[in-house]
Amino acid sequence: MSDQRLAAGVDLGGTKIYSLVADSEGHVLGEDRRPTNAALGVDSVVERIVASVRAALEHADLEFADVEGLGISTPGPCDPARGLISEAPNLGWIDVPLVELVRKKVGIRTLLENDAAAAAYGEMRFGAARGKQHVLYVTLGTGIGGGIIIDGRIYRGASGAAGEVGHLVLEPDGALCNCGARGCLEALASGTAIAREAQKAIADGRSVTMAGIAGDRGVTGEIVLEAAERGDAVAEEIIRRAGRYLGLGLVGLLNTFNPEALILGGGLVGLGDLYLGPAFAAARECGFEQILNDVTMTTAELGGRSGALGAAALITDRQPA
Amino acid sequence: MSDQRLAAGVDLGGTKIYSLVADSEGHVLGEDRRPTNAALGVDSVVERIVASVRAALEHADLEFADVEGLGISTPGPCDPARGLISEAPNLGWIDVPLVELVRKKVGIRTLLENDAAAAAYGEMRFGAARGKQHVLYVTLGTGIGGGIIIDGRIYRGASGAAGEVGHLVLEPDGALCNCGARGCLEALASGTAIAREAQKAIADGRSVTMAGIAGDRGVTGEIVLEAAERGDAVAEEIIRRAGRYLGLGLVGLLNTFNPEALILGGGLVGLGDLYLGPAFAAARECGFEQILNDVTMTTAELGGRSGALGAAALITDRQPA
């Protein structure tokens, strides 16, 4: 047994709960994964979170009393100071006082943090941005979000909404974004954007390969990637174009923040060079030289663990919620 | 005489030096303005800065020993920690150790700060963002720059280059920017952008009014405004369009920072509603509701004094350089 200080971390997602127990150096001592089953309602999900953390603790021969607290990484806008999930569309939750509900059952300090911010913190403490003070983390999936670390601490802004980096406008007359604006980074470079463009190409008969792979299923980034890897030029161009837009969004973030590290995470990182190549190239082509010299631009190191590890580290670092 | 703590502040510009003495509440006790005469070289400008501050002090019956220090707001990239002006194109300076040169002559604590950051600090302490902790200040002139205040302190980034908000990309295939990229906010919404579009309109014979007002002089924002006020629809559209782009840039800044205040300063604010109306409208149309509810969006209150007052306040607030 480590004599270090310990904490539990949970990554609460729309489909699964991932829990771990880690020490203050980010070593994982135990973990657990199980479905969220969000449809069963808030109380049921709270029970599942508690059971998952208990299982992770048991794998390390620990109990709740052995850890300093529990940090929860949550999807969507939240209010860490009040321990509230403001809105979690993929859980169907609005204004759920998650911290209070969980703390009553576990009896230890509990906090929550937005998933992108928690992942940013995790990557700063234990991953690709280790030792840096000013870090941007951009999560690339169905949507595009961001976590901002300034002076080694999560920056939340006036009301916890900071980091909506998916909503930089890049094409004023571009595709409509979920947020209601046009041509946001998210509308041009996310998984949703890639799938939309692929769908259009299939409908227009421009990609027999993608049509064949997709069949009756919806088009996803993976399908577009598979088609590209089979030599489908249309699929390749869709991914490259999204990557180029991502890079132009990163230019704005770099020039504004002058960060020490810019970390890309989330499922779309799996698209690899076809997506990340044009992104990094655009950033290097258009960013300020001094700013480019200062920054380490790379992908996340902690993978699916970054949010839970970050949330646990907020406990052992005694960061304010 | 106030028994409050006092500091001197200087706004060093390409054409003029503005100095003041202020107390820690931002009350101005004395001031002085004189030409920079940058062509006479660094030593001469240093002499003029010292003479200008001495004159401002004399207006308040004070000497250098009566103030806690001297803060200098400087144009362009600088390194406050080392007291260096890295590059000031409008002074023709590169790597000038201004703090050391001035301090030797005045014998009191001296610091320098980038003008947009100093103005942001001034507006936060005494102006339109008084009492706020998270403040964005955007300066609109020939170029577009920014000052960022986080937790009540200037945020400089990894090497002091943070705040280059003029280089958010807004039109990937848009006009070429001074920075080498295309379609930056600065290339679409600055005084330079407005003048460029006006020049095009004159060359194409689309605006007899602007051609008449401009005559043999170069086109400036004021000329475009004057033409618009005389009913020239082309001039009006040029200003409105620049304002709209400004607003789309502000959307990205708002969604990323979730600030408590967003302050617009600089000469272009003089274009008034024709420019600011479309800017604020675009921001309100495209920003996130929660973020818009949090923010006060307005123009600077301290006008030409914001940089010098901010630099002086960095002294009385004992902020680190």
Image (tube, coloured by chain):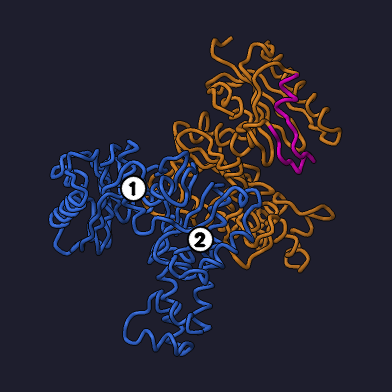
Chain colours: A blue, B orange
* Mark 1: few/some/many CA within 10 Å (<14, 14-19, 20+): some
Q: Which residue is mark 1?
A: A27
Disc 1/disc 2 C-alpha distance (Å): 39 Å
Earlier-in-chain disc, 1 versus 2 = 1
The percent position of residue A61, horizontal first and vertical second, equals 18, 47
Is B179 displayed left or right of B243 in the figure? right
Label 2 element class: loop
Q: Which residue is mark 2?
A: A169
Q: Amino acid at mark 2?
A: Val
Residue toward you, A214 or A182: A214
Residue positioned 54% across, 64% down in the render: A279
Q: Is residue A269 above or below residue A119?
A: below
Q: Is residue A116 above or below residue A64?
A: below
Q: Is residue A121 above or below residue B85?
A: below
Extreme residue toward the front, this view: A1
Residue toward you, B119 or B274: B119
* Discs 1, 2: same chain: yes
Is B272 displayed left or right of B105 in the figure? left
The percent position of residue B95, horizontal first and vertical second, equals 74, 37
Is A162 displayed left or right of B213 in the figure? left
Extreme residue toward the right, this view: B40
Q: What's the magenta region?
A: B84-104
* Mark 2: few/some/many CA within 10 Å (<14, 14-19, 20+): many
Indicate yes or no whether the magenta region holds residue A164. Answer: no
Indicate yes or no whether the magenta region holds residue B91. Answer: yes
